[in-house]
Amino acid sequence: MWNRVLILALLGIAWVSPRPICAQQMPSAVVADPSPDKQHPPGLAILTVPSHGVELDAWLYVASGEGPLGTVILAHGLPGYESSGDLAQSIRRAGWNVLFFHYRGTWGVPGAFSQSSAIEDMAEVVRFLRDPANAAKYHTDPKQLVIVGHSFGGFIAGYEAAHDPDIKAVAMIAAVNHGKINADPKEREARLKRWETQLHPVRGATAAQLFAEAEQHAKDWDYVQWADMLRTRPILLIEADDQNHADMEALASALRQKGSAHLEQKTVATDHSFSDHRIALQTIVIDWLQQLRQ
């Protein structure tokens, strides 16, 4: 392990040890509620976001404070069994609004799911938050939009940030590279079998159809190729010990080659869902968000 730590240190990559992070190292938002603000208390706003003829179920964790406040769009995976609600609450305690939504064709939202439609849904969520009427209603700052995504959500987050230069920053957590899921036959088969058992909340698409769609878009959906479009913004890459680790390493390398001055890369010794490192995950994200305000 120490050899790996040394190598990571030389590369400028942070290794998060399996040992628990002590409370003194944690941002207060991870472990403590903020002081009450009776004039501008936190809350939960239930809303829908229109996207290509469908109303996406969404909810906004409203942070305390007068505002306008920055907003983090938290994109879940496919289908999203790990919704990262703990991360959303920590982000809100840190003073950011958090918008969470379901893609078309998932979790009871009408329509048929596809990776292409999910990309469109994210763009519509961004459009919704930039609408002056919505910004005024929810006291949000349209110029302070950050996207944080896990797994498939990490792919979606990276895609939107790469194609929208006005996104302030992006965090990709154990992100699936949909341009590469068909590249290695052995890994493809293992991933396909896993997807076939996990798509119960998904309507309108089978695992095989999603893999075929990814094959059609392999060139455009390889997130390593987005490095030049991402290099100008703060980007956080959080890797786990999973099938996506090598692709995220490749993205980090490409960002460095493109001269990214705002890359932060973390490696955590845990599974794809960060099951035994949820506090560590929150700590990394909150520390990074606090840096965006400096």
Image (cartoon, helix red, strand yellow):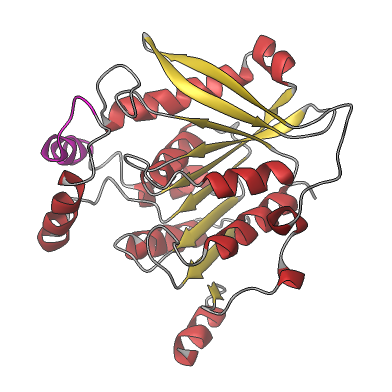
Query: Quadrant location of the N terminus?
Result: bottom left
Q: Quadrant of residue 57?
A: top left
- Front residue (pair 170, 138): 138
Q: Quadrant of residue 190?
A: bottom left
- Front residue (pair 257, 110): 110
Q: Position of residue 47 (x, y in %)?
A: 55, 17
Name the magenta segment's main secondary structure. Answer: helix
Is residue 73 rendered magenta in the image?
no
Q: Position of residue 121 (x, y in %)?
A: 41, 24
Instruction: Answer left or right for 101 relative to 225.
Output: right
Residue 161 appears in the picture as rendered: yes
Q: Residue at x 41, y 38 (%)?
A: 156
Q: Residue at x 36, y 64 (%)?
A: 245
Instruction: Answer left or right for 222 relative to 290.
Output: left
- Front residue (pair 279, 116): 279
The residue range painted magenta reads 203-217
Q: Position of residue 268 (x, y in %)?
A: 48, 69
Residue 232 appears in the picture as rendered: no
With respect to residue 222, does 57 lie above or below?
above
**Numbered marks: total:** 0
- Front residue (pair 164, 84): 84
Q: Quadrant of residue 78?
A: top left
Q: Position of residue 94 (x, y in %)?
A: 73, 46
With respect to residue 2, does 146 lie above or below?
above
With respect to residue 275, does 97 lie above or below?
above
Q: Residue at x 46, y 34 (%)?
A: 160
